[in-house]
């Protein structure tokens, strides 16, 4: 259910991006990128009253839920007012008045999202992913429809802002309608200290990371141009495709699943190592192929006016190879109650990363992309060091979990690389790119078979379960 929901959202998002990128210019989209960078920082401040508190709590009462919603309401209201009132000041810093209406409409959407937040969190705790899928899918489809419609009608960068409002309204109404637990929204301050104790570390960590994530856009938009910020944003978006496609369904499941294991007193070591092996067998081959076929992928997704993104995609895809544990580290540390270590990790990696990226920004767009070749490996090393403290994993055990994936990735990329070498340029046609992709798929399966990778066993087991469920007629796969 979770995977289906994420894939529908992913398809909706990229159909939207593909269409809107051909309607709006990079400068227009740059306004949205800068606006969302500021909103991202504001959203992180809401994590001081994090809804994840409800997931990890050992014993949950109605009073806990009502208290959590009340604290979230107070924080969200303060942040919304601050964001809307500071819009002229932020717009003045970039010399672009278009940011004022954008930030104010987004602030409204930010507040409206609150209606769905506690309901979806409780559904995640109960692992009711069918209902979550229905809510989030409806929101994603609404956002896509409104964005495209308004862009065609000439709303320009404001299309994204009004689409977020539409999505927040749809998800809020569905969440409340499906749960019908109206008692959640009755104000109460019972248990507020426990939530703030959890949210203190969580919010500070989120604020550090969101500031770090927003910094490249803010610097590029201020030092270079809004176009540069838009190009960097689209480059990162394409490089995040493998994670969104591969881990799309797993991300929302990982924290509740690990938390359930921890509540029952089980070790997270083997599940963590198994997950590393499965993730890297999918992520690493995809990133290498993405780097080699960056030109036709950018051309297909974004169109002719975005070819400046290609170099960014090639560089960032290679740097992202070191991010293989990122989606697992936070859930593991939260599940074992080590929120303080998440904050300590952020205190180490964020300042160093900010300094590196800030220096790189003065040398241009590609320099910022190249800086990630230092930043991401450094963050990965620090993150794994903290995780190893709590689930006692040796570096050799990490290597043992992922080396087969490295072999699979090398075999997978051989085919696309051969196509590019044969053509003599990365600027290959879509037909040639499809040939390379077909060779990559064949190489990936060959690599799984040659290495005896655990993922192949999982795939075969999944096929067998699929057939036993009566969804495939006997004999069809023979």
Image (cartoon, helix red, strand yellow):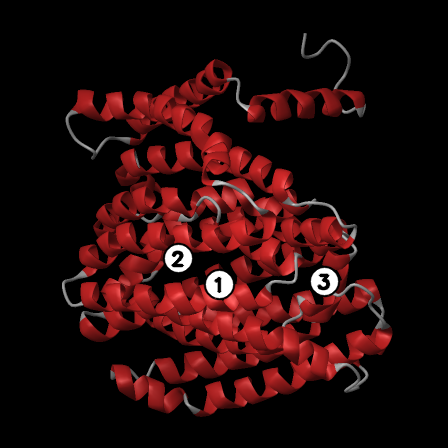
Q: Quadrant of the N terminus?
A: top right
x then y, percent, for residue 257: 70, 49
Estimate the spatial distance between the alpha carbons at disc 3 and disc 2, rounded to whole Å: 37 Å
Q: Can residue 452 be seen by looking at this rendering?
A: yes
Disc nearest the viewer among 3 and 2: 3
Q: Mark 1 or mark 3, which is nearer the start of the sequence? A: 3
Q: Mark 1 or mark 2, which is nearer the start of the sequence? A: 2
Foreground residue among 145 and 429: 429
Residue 365 falls in image quadrant: bottom left
Q: Can residue 19 be seen by looking at this rendering?
A: no
Q: Name the residue beneath numbered marker 1.
A: 147
Q: Is residue 297 above or below residue 199?
A: above
- Circle 2/circle 1 CB separation < 8 Å: yes
Q: Quadrant of the C terminus?
A: top right
Circle 1: element type: helix
Estimate the spatial distance between the alpha carbons at disc 3 and disc 1, rounded to whole Å: 32 Å
Residue 177 falls in image quadrant: bottom right
User: Dot 2: few (<14), some (14–19), or many (≥20) neighbours within 10 Å?
Assistant: many
**Could you say which disc has been placed on residue 20 in the image?**
2
Disc nearest the viewer among 3 and 1: 3
Q: Residue at x 35, y 25 (%)?
A: 410
Circle 3: element type: helix
x then y, percent, for residue 231: 28, 58
**Could you say which disc has been placed on residue 364 in the image?**
none
Left or right of residue 207, residue 65 in this image: right
Circle 2: element type: helix
**Could you say which disc has been placed on residue 55 in the image?**
3
Q: Mark 2 or mark 3, which is nearer the start of the sequence? A: 2
Q: Residue at x 52, y 78 (%)?
A: 45
Estimate the spatial distance between the alpha carbons at disc 2 and disc 1, rounded to whole Å: 8 Å
Residue 300 falls in image quadrant: top left
């Amino acid at each position: 259910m979770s995977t289906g929901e994420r894939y529908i959202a992913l398809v909706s998002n990229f159909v939207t991006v593909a269409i809107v990128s051909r309607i709006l210019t990079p400068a227009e989209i740059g306004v949205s990128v800068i606006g969302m960078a500021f909103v991202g920082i504001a959203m992180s401040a809401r994590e001081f009253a994090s809804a994840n508190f409800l997931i990890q709590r050992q014993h949950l009462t109605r009073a806990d839920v009502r208290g959590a919603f009340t604290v979230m309401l107070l924080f969200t209201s303060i942040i919304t007012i601050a964001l809307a009132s500071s819009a002229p000041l932020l717009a003045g810093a970039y010399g672009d008045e278009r940011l004022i209406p954008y930030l104010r409409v987004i602030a409204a959407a930010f507040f409206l999202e609150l209606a769905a937040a506690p309901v979806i969190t409780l559904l995640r705790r109960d692992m009711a992913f069918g209902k979550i899928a229905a809510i989030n899918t409806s929101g994603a489809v609404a956002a896509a429809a409104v964005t495209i419609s308004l862009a065609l009608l000439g709303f320009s960068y404001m299309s994204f802002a009004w689409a977020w409002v539409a999505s927040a309204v749809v998800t809020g109404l569905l969440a409340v309608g499906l749960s019908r637990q109206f008692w959640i929204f009755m104000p109460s301050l019972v248990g507020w200290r426990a939530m703030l104790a959890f949210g203190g570390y969580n919010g500070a960590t989120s604020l550090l990371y969101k500031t770090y994530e927003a910094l490249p856009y803010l610097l590029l938009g201020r030092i270079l141009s809004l176009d540069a910020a838009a190009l960097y944003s689209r480059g990162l978006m394409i490089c995040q495709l493998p994670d969104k496609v591969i881990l799309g369904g797993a991300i929302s499941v990982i924290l509740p699943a690990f938390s359930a294991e921890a509540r029952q007193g089980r070790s997270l070591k083997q599940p963590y190592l198994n997950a590393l092996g499965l993730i890297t067998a999918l992520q690493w081959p995809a990133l290498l192929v993405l780097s080699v076929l960056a030109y036709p992928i950018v051309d297909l997704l974004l169109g002719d006016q975005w070819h400046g993104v290609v170099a960014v995609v090639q560089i960032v895809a290679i740097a992202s190879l070191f991010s293989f544990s990122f989606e697992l580290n936070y859930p593991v540390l939260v599940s074992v109650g080590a929120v303080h270590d998440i904050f300590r990790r952020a205190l180490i990696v964020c300042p160093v990363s900010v300094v590196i990226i800030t220096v790189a920004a003065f040398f241009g767009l590609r320099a910022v992309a190249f800086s990630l070749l230092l930043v991401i490996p450094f963050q990965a090393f620090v993150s794994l060091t903290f995780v190893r403290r709590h689930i006692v994993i040796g570096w050799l055990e990490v290597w043992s979990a992922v080396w087969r994936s490295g072999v699979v990735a090398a075999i997978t990329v051989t085919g696309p690389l051969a196509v590019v070498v044969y053509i003599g340029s990365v600027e290959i046609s879509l037909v040639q790119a499809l040939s390379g992709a077909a060779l990559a798929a064949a190489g990936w399966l060959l690599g799984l078979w040659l290495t005896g990778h655990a993922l192949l066993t999982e795939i075969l087991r999944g096929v067998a379960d699929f057939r036993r469920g009566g969804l495939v007629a006997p004999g069809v796969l023979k």
